[in-house]
Image (cartoon, helix red, strand yellow):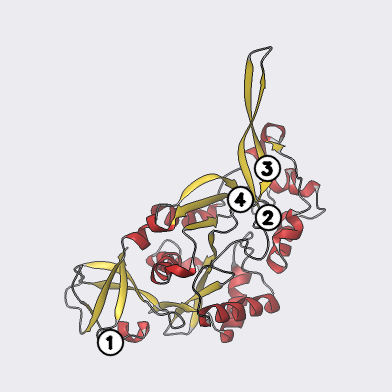
């Protein structure tokens, strides 16, 4: 059985393995033991704190195979992007110019450095073993974060965003970075992303051009990357799009990948999830597959389970599921159909 839970310091060696396997551009998962250790400790503190509103907290989850104790994935929630430093993006909007004398008005798409998205809750750090891609466990790894937000709403913003990794080729070259960022840093794309993971995107963003970049002046290969998803990031995009997230006018600073945004109350797994009390026992006639979580904080757990669930009634869970979720009779659980 696979279960999603908060990260522990003892997970560090396995977490570094996941970092090595993760997609270039997932800067929140650096392949550096000290940075990962700091990230784990920060998460542990966040789960322990009594929080009344969204702050700098970071909630780091891992997906564990209970039979082998092997970690097969990880994902995160940053309660407030840009809480301690600006959260930079590129805003892609038309720059309008007009001539009254010639009676001409013209709009040219331009990219402008901004931190408009600061203050929103950020989903990040999604990575799952290749063997589990496009399975129910990818849904678990991504959407269980949303069930956690539903259970602890005061800890998060009323808007949730996520950045999807943009296009780069098999050699790690990003046409967008080569046309934009590389002119301001003598660094290849992979190294720039690595530095963001180890340090912060702020020091790089502050050296980026402060004036609009006119899109038609970029090479066509770079223009084609604006809003384009890396093939390995498509699943993360698809899951959240089904949840009600939408693309907008913001793209990633370094690779031009799209940003998704949704009002928290309109996200499917938040708005349509059910709560029920547990009735221990065998599940004799499972009629559907669900994501199931407890509503705990430090002991948060979420799994995939086949159940016979009727809204408004207790839900029957067998002993293994109860043990995995760390619950007992009459405990509340939260459910959403896959």
Distance Cα–Cα, label 2 vs label 1 = 47 Å
Label 1: how many Cα within 10 Å (few below 14, some 14–19, many 20+): some
Using the image, determine if residue 90 lies above or below residue 319: above
- Of callouts 1 and 3, which one flags the residue occurring earlier in the amino acid sequence? 3
Residue contact between numbered discs 1 and 3, judged by CB atoms under 8 Å: no
Q: Position of residue 181 (x, y in %)?
A: 75, 49
Q: Secondary structure at mark 1?
A: helix
Report the quarter where the N terminus lies.
bottom left
- Residue extending farthest to the front is 52
- Of callouts 4 and 2, which one flags the residue occurring earlier in the amino acid sequence? 4
Q: Secondary structure at mark 2?
A: loop
Which residue position holds label 4?
116
- Of callouts 2 and 1, which one flags the residue occurring earlier in the amino acid sequence? 2
Residue 333 visible within the image: yes
Depth-wise, is mark 2 or mark 3 nearer the camera? 3
In this orientation, which residue lies closer to the viewer: 179 or 296? Answer: 296
Q: Residue 172's mark?
A: 2
Label 3: how many Cα within 10 Å (few below 14, some 14–19, many 20+): many
Distance Cα–Cα, label 1 vs label 4 = 48 Å
Using the image, determine if residue 15 lies above or below residue 179: below
Q: Residue 244's mark?
A: none
Q: Secondary structure at mark 4?
A: loop
Which residue corresponds to the image point at 67% horizontal and 58% vertical from the top-left? 86
Depth-wise, is mark 1 or mark 3 nearer the camera? 3
- Of callouts 2 and 3, which one flags the residue occurring earlier in the amino acid sequence? 3
Q: Position of residue 172 (x, y in %)?
A: 68, 55
Which residue corresponds to the image point at 56% horizontal and 69% vertical from the top-left? 55
Which residue position holds label 3?
112
Using the image, determine if residue 122 lies above or below residue 168: below
User: Position of 306 compared to 196: left or right?
Assistant: left
């Amino acid at each position: 059985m696979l279960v999603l839970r908060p990260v522990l310091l003892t997970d560090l060696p396995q977490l570094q393995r996941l970092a090595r396997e993760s997609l270039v551009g997932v800067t929140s998962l650096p392949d550096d033991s000290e940075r990962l250790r700091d990230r784990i400790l920060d998460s542990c503190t966040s789960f322990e704190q009594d929080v009344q509103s969204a702050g700098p907290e970071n909630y780091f989850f891992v997906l564990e195979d209970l039979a082998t104790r092997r970690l097969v994935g990880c994902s995160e929630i940053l309660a407030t992007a840009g809480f301690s430093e600006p959260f930079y993006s590129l805003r892609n909007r038309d720059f309008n110019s007009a001539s009254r004398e010639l009676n001409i008005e013209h709009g040219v798409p331009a990219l402008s450095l901004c931190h408009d998205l600061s203050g929103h809750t950020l989903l990040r750090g999604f990575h799952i073993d290749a063997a589990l891609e496009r399975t129910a466990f990818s849904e678990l790894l991504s959407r269980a974060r949303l069930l956690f937000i539903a259970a602890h709403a005061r800890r998060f913003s009323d808007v949730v965003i996520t950045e999807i990794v943009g296009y780069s080729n098999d050699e790690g070259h990003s046409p967008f970075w080569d046309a934009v960022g590389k002119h301001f840093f003598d660094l290849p794309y992979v190294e720039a992303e690595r530095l963001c993971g180890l340090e912060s995107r702020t020091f790089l963003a502050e050296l980026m051009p402060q004036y609009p970049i006119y899109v038609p002046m970029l090479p066509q290969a770079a223009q084609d990357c604006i809003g384009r998803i890396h093939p390995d990031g498509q699943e993360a995009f698809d899951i959240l799009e089904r949840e009600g997230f939408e693309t907008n006018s913001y793209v990633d600073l370094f690779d031009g990948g799209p940003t998704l945004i949704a009002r928290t109350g309109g996200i499917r797994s938040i708005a349509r999830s059910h709560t029920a009390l547990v009735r221990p026992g065998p599940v004799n006639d499972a009629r559907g597959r669900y994501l199931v979580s407890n509503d705990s904080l430090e002991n948060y757990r979420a799994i995939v389970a086949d159940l016979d669930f009727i809204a408004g009634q207790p839900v029957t869970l067998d002993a293994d599921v109860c043990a995995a979720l760390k619950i007992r009779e009459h405990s509340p659980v939260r459910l959403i159909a896959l």
